[in-house]
Image (spheres, rainbow, N blue to C red):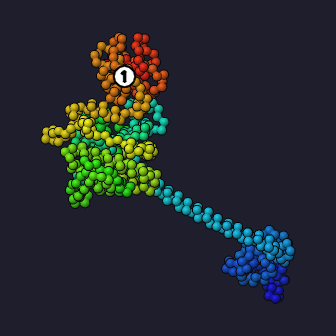
Amino acid sequence: MDNFRKPSRDNQRRSIDSIRGGPAKQRPSERPLGRRPLAMDGLRTSGRRVDGFRRPDGLYPTQPSTVRTHVPVAPKAATAASGASLLHMTLPGGELSAKSSPRGARKAAKAKKQGKLHTIRKWFVRSTLVLAALALLLGGYLGVKALTKVNKVFKGGGTAAALQSDVKPELLKGEGDGRINILLLGRGGGDHAGPDLTDTILVASIDPVNKTASLVSIPRDLWVTVPGAGSSKVNAVFANAKYRSLNNNPKDKAKAEAAGAKAIENVVSDVLGIPIHYYTIVDFQAFKQAVDTVGGVDMNVPTELAVTERMWDETTGKPYYLNVPAGNQHFDGTRALFFTRTRHTSARGDFDRTERQRLFIQALSQKILSAGTFTNPVKVSQLMSDFGDHIATDLSVGNAIRLAQIGKNVKQSDIKSVGLADPPNNYLQTDNLGGVSIVRPSAGLGDYSAIQNYIRNTLRDPYLAKENASLTVLNGTTVPGLATAKANELKSFGYKVTKVGDAPTQAYAHTIIVDKTGGKKPFTKNYLEKRFGVKATTKMPDSTIESQGADFVIILGQDDAN
């Protein structure tokens, strides 16, 4: 029989009958180089088993010394140290005997199935880990790439206490500070004529308490005066301040940009009577590419804003035919740019253009938020690539993230479009000044009081509105009309003044604020204290004065009259 062939001389020390017992001893000089102990689980050729079993089924021939064998770890029951033999494996109760019985066959089949399942699970886990690693690497790359570009765009510097999730009264500087007001400026940039003229001037005012927002537009031809810098159209304020800064220091372009932004911030704040917390300047290229990145914008164009005009495209050096009928329209970047720039409609001219800009920015902001752009690293990376050097802002990365969180909760129906020349709120009108076509307040050049009253009440401080405290204003001086003037001023900021009159005596040297709420309306109290520069008290200075249900009683003193 082949399994009992006579052993060769080379194998005499290893086996005499192919029934393995304890290991034969070899002198070191007789051991072949690179040889390993024989495997206990059958023959292998080129790393593959011949018999397909994990352990031997019976007697098998010894291997020639020329065949290299793969050596798996032998089971404890079959190790040489245990004294087990291949013959023992075939006896009743041994492994092969167990497999040959029905019960043993079932166990063997179950073990084989479990082995396959184990292999599948191992493959699945490894594949999942590989995919997860690739996702992390890709996400990490996009995240770092986007973050690098984001940090280049969002330089920080502005501040708005209302951005915090838990706003304390003492953090708010004054009425209107409970909102977040962002000045949005659009300029030509690049090789466009007048690249730093801000022909688009909008204020996005966000109410984080009630989750609403308003867009207020200022016509580019509004005639304004900058202290120490003369008068001009408002669209030239940024450019003039920037160039003045560059004349002093041609190398510091960043400082010049900041100087221009600060100048127009101050002017817009004076015109509207509200604080400006941040600014953002975008040029034509960034605007176009941003619209294209989000897949374009759909909006319903009112009949009065429909337009057909042959315009000049400075980028291509060719004419562009703009045709936007009324109704639902889709805008790509180029069409959107020309639609928001055109003045070719009714006699309202620039007023219609500012209304187009408000409506389009409203639609664009909703598209960006609804598309989940800020939570998509790919989209963020694309937007940052679009912006690059074509946008400047003093928002920080943290500010932008917080704004995105607030903006997600603002419905499109809760975004209000506010114009200064939209009937019945006709606070601006066109005029001619020295042969120059301008826009001026209806009340007269430089008189923004009516505009400020309208805007402050339209963009009422949310904390002031929430408490809605009632005020009684009394004149404690001999200055006639002081209480009425102060009451009107307070009303312009959104206060609810319920009574105006004279105090029992007119000898008050200092203004007194009496809090009748027991500290239940802290935001109103904070604003009043900062406005009048005094601390509120809970005790009435004169027992004959009746609050008549008012939350706060203000007795004006001579210091306020002065």
Query: Residue at (40%, 13%) from the top-left corner?
Result: 545
Q: Nearer the viewer, residue 148 or 434?
A: 434
Question: Image quadrant for the C terminus?
Answer: top left
Q: Which amino acid, mark 1?
A: Thr
Is any part of residue 237 visible from this angle?
no
- The quadrant holding residue 559 is top left
Q: Secondary structure at mark 1?
A: strand
Q: Nearer the viewer, residue 384 or 403?
A: 403
Query: Residue at (27%, 45%) from the top-left corner?
Result: 354
Horizontal and vertical percent position of residue 405: 45, 45
Is any part of residue 384 visible from this angle?
yes
Query: Residue at (42%, 49%) from the top-left corner?
Result: 369
Residue at the extreme left of the image, as rendered:
435
* Residue annotated with mark 1: 498
Q: How many marks?
A: 1
- The quadrant holding residue 325 is bottom left
Left or right of 386: which side holds 197?
Answer: left
Horizontal and vertical percent position of residue 137: 51, 59
**Rendered view: 43 above or below 196:** below
- The quadrant holding residue 406 is top left
Horizontal and vertical percent position of residue 106: 76, 71
Crowding near pointer 1: few (<14 within 10 Å), some, many (20+)? some
